[in-house]
Amino acid sequence: MKHSSPDGFGDEIVKLENACKVYQMGRQQVNALAGVSISFKRGSFWAIMGPSGSGKSTMMNILGCLDRLTRGAYFLEGKDVSSLDDDALSEFRLRHLGFIFQSFNLIPQLTVQRNIELPLYYLGWDSEKSARRAQELACRVGLEARLDHRPAELSGGQMQRVAIARALANDPQILLADEPTGNLDTATGEQILQLLVELSQQDKTIIMVTHEFHIAAYAQARLHMKDGCIDRIE
């Protein structure tokens, strides 16, 4: 069954066609994704939900170019990335995607500024241009006074803001967020979710995995997974 984004969003930016992912577990084959077809439109904010083993994490790994489909196709900004070799896939991921993790994944030895600059180092930006970009993004997430601090000197909410700024460093069109408020208190989590809402209003496409209904309520659309298939969209 073909699923599309709800009406009211912009043009299509992500599309899965008959996406299948099979894992070999000993003698048993596990269908983590079983023929999923769906499109996500530019500027939309999605929550992917489902119980453990439903396929939501596998879908996130496929969308993030961290894993490959067994069968089917994945189009990202109109390009069939499922056909790219490993080096081309890594380059495409670096230039087009931003990642926000539950555990922040900051480098403790680096300052806020250096953590934000990290993707730009791999893109070959010079230090002056990278510093300007990091300062601009720190202001955007309200951390301009913390540029010289290290992660251990920050609160959980501040660390997640650094992670969001780092995810935005390469100006990606798509942000993938895996339980982005899982390590935060309720009030701080709401601030992070509101920031994601604002980013979607600025034409960023947000795809977030969560198991919490009150968190998914911030998204414009909710995709429920079950047994490797799309159960429903609301």
Image (cartoon, rainbow, N blue to C red):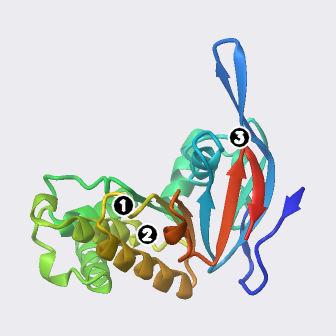
Of the pair 135 and 140, the residue shown nearer to us: 140
Which element type, helix, strand or loop, lies under badge 3? loop
Residue at point 35%, 64% (across, down): 120
**Quarter of the rendering containing residue 87:** top right
In the structure shown, which secondary structural element does the residue marked by tag 2 occupy?
A: loop
Q: Nearer the viewer, residue 164 or 48?
A: 48
Distance of label 1 from label 3 (alpha carbons): 25 Å
Q: Amino acid at mark 3?
A: Leu
- Element type at mark 1: helix
Residue 211 lies, in percent from the top left, at 53, 56
Where residue 112 sits in the image (x, y, percent)? 19, 67
Q: Position of residue 92 (x, y in %)?
A: 56, 56
Q: Residues within 10 Å of mark 2 (few under 14, many from 20)?
A: many
Residue at x-position 38% and y-position 64%: 181
Report the amino acid beneath label 2. Answer: Asn
Q: Is residue 22 above or below residue 24?
A: below
Earlier along the polypeptide chain: callout 3 or callout 2? 3
Residue indicated by mark 1:
119
Measure how far apart labels 3 and 2 are at the Cα level.
25 Å
* Label 3 vs label 2, nearer the camera: 3
Q: Which residue is mark 3?
A: 69
Classify 10 Å Cα crowding around label 3: few (below 14), some (14-19), many (20 and above): many
Q: Nearer the viewer, mark 1 or mark 3?
A: 3
Q: Tell me what residue is drawn at x 36 percent, y 60 percent.
A: 119
Residue pointed to by mark 2: 170
**Residues marked 1 and 2 touching at CB (< 8 Å):** yes
